[in-house]
């Protein structure tokens, strides 16, 4: 008979103590019977997935693993940014230096060309004078032409190399050349070419606006004259206004009165007093209305006041009453008050020890 194997006895709980069989001992542990063939050792820890299973396939899944959190600026990043700005600044400065050098070279080239043309003109003039001397000029004329060419050549030198007289002659010669150039420009000017230019159009518009401003100023002057005449009528009356007009009749009457005053030497003192009164009245009128100064002088106003006085005397003798002149009451003078916003700091600084008189007289301080 075959012997039946006894079942394996587990000692998982022995007298209140949890125990377990060791896997590496096989069947030689607490199990007295032979170990079953299906029991194998196990590996501790988590078992990873198969290779290639956790790799994202789509770009969407791949982008989900990217860290999108904002990174803080480090010192290295700031330094790189500063180096980039420094490089851009250096390139800009190099470009400016190159432009300035090119402009300087261009100015020097133009200066050399202008001087070369000037030397060529002087040389050509001198040669022409010499050729004319050889052909049909007398020795005196040739010498005069040569001296003239030499004088012009001397005047073409810089101003600091000329005397005062030569500098004046050089200035006259330069003005003549400029006038000739201007005349040549005016003769060869293409008006249709410049009239469409924006700058010329702007200048023409400015001239038109200036003309309108001057016309408006003339209209304002006319209005001021009319207002002054109206103020005279309001203050002195229409009869006095008519007497103040500088007409031929008024001037004739004034001249007749002057002749009568000269013919009466006995009344010279009285006439002098009347003239002083008329002058004082004229001065008071000028003080009251400043606009009268643009129409009448002090002498003409004195004559008008004298004629007004004569008109008043004639009206009084014929028992006519003159309307009283409505004079505006004098305006009170405004009260002027000066306020210092230093809050007394100026007086405190004046009384400071450092500003005492002896401090400024002592040489040891």
Image (spheres, rainbow, N blue to C red):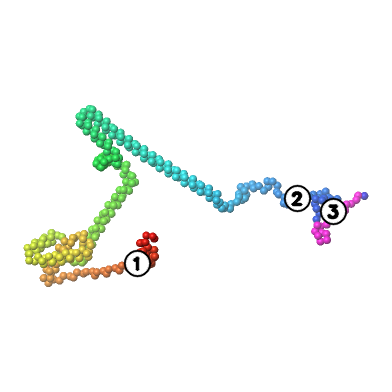
Vertical order, 57 against 363 (above or below): above
Within the magenta stretch, is there residue 14? yes
Q: Nearer the viewer, mark 1 or mark 2?
A: 1
| Mark 1 and mark 2: Cα distance apart in space | 100 Å
The disc at residue 43 is 2
Q: Residue at x 92, y 50 (%)?
A: 1
Residue 183 part of the magenta-drawn span: no
Q: Which residue is mark 1?
A: 339
Q: Is residue 231 visible?
A: no
What span is in magenta? 2-19
Residue 359 lies, in percent from the top left, at 37, 63
Q: Secondary structure at mark 2?
A: loop
Residue 108 in view in this figure:
yes
Q: Position of residue 168 (x, y in %)?
A: 25, 42
Q: Residue 31: give its label.
A: 3
- The residue sitting at 31% across, 43% down in the picture is 194
Is 89 displayed left or right of 129 in the figure? right
N-terminal label among 3 and 2 = 3
Q: Quadrant of residue 302?
A: bottom left
- Upstream in the sequence, badge 1 or badge 2? 2
Mark 2: few, some, or many residues within 10 Å (few <14, many ≥20)?
Answer: few
For marks 3 and 1, the one nearer the N-term is: 3
């Amino acid at each position: 008979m075959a012997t039946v194997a006894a079942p394996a006895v587990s000692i998982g709980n022995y007298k209140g103590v949890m125990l377990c069989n060791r896997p590496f001992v096989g069947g030689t542990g607490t199990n007295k019977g032979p170990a079953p063939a299906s029991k194998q050792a196990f590996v501790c820890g988590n078992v990873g997935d198969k290779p290639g299973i956790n790799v994202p396939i789509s770009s969407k899944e791949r982008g989900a693993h990217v860290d999108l959190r904002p990174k803080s600026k480090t010192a290295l990043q700031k330094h790189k940014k500063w180096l980039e700005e420094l490089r851009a600044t250096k390139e800009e400065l190099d470009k400016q230096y190159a432009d300035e050098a090119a402009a300087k070279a261009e100015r020097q080239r133009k200066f050399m060309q202008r001087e070369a043309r000037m030397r060529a003109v002087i040389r050509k003039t001198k040669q022409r004078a010499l050729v004319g001397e050889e052909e049909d000029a007398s020795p005196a004329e040739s010498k005069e032409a040569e001296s003239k060419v030499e004088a012009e050549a001397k005047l073409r030198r810089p101003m600091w190399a000329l005397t005062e007289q030569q500098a004046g002659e050089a200035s006259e010669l330069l003005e003549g050349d400029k006038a000739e150039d201007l005349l040549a420009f005016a003769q060869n000017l293409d008006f249709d070419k410049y009239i469409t230019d924006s700058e010329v159009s702007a200048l023409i518009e400015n001239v038109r606006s200036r003309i309108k401003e001057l016309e408006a100023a003339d209209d304002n002057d006319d209005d001021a004259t009319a207002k002054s005449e109206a103020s005279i009528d309001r203050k002195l009356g229409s009869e006095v206004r008519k007497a103040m007009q500088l007409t031929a009749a008024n001037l004739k009457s004034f001249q007749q009165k002057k002749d009568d005053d000269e013919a009466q030497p006995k009344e010279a003192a009285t006439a002098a007093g009347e003239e002083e009164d008329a002058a004082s009245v004229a001065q008071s009128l000028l003080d009251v209305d400043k606009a009268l100064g643009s129409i009448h002088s002090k002498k003409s106003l004195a004559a008008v006041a004298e004629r007004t006085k004569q008109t008043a005397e004639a009206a009084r003798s014929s028992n006519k009453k003159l309307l009283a002149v409505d004079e505006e009451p004098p305006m009170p003078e405004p009260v002027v008050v000066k306020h210092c916003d230093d809050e007394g700091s100026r007086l405190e600084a004046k009384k400071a020890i450092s500003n005492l008189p002896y401090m400024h007289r002592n040489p040891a301080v």
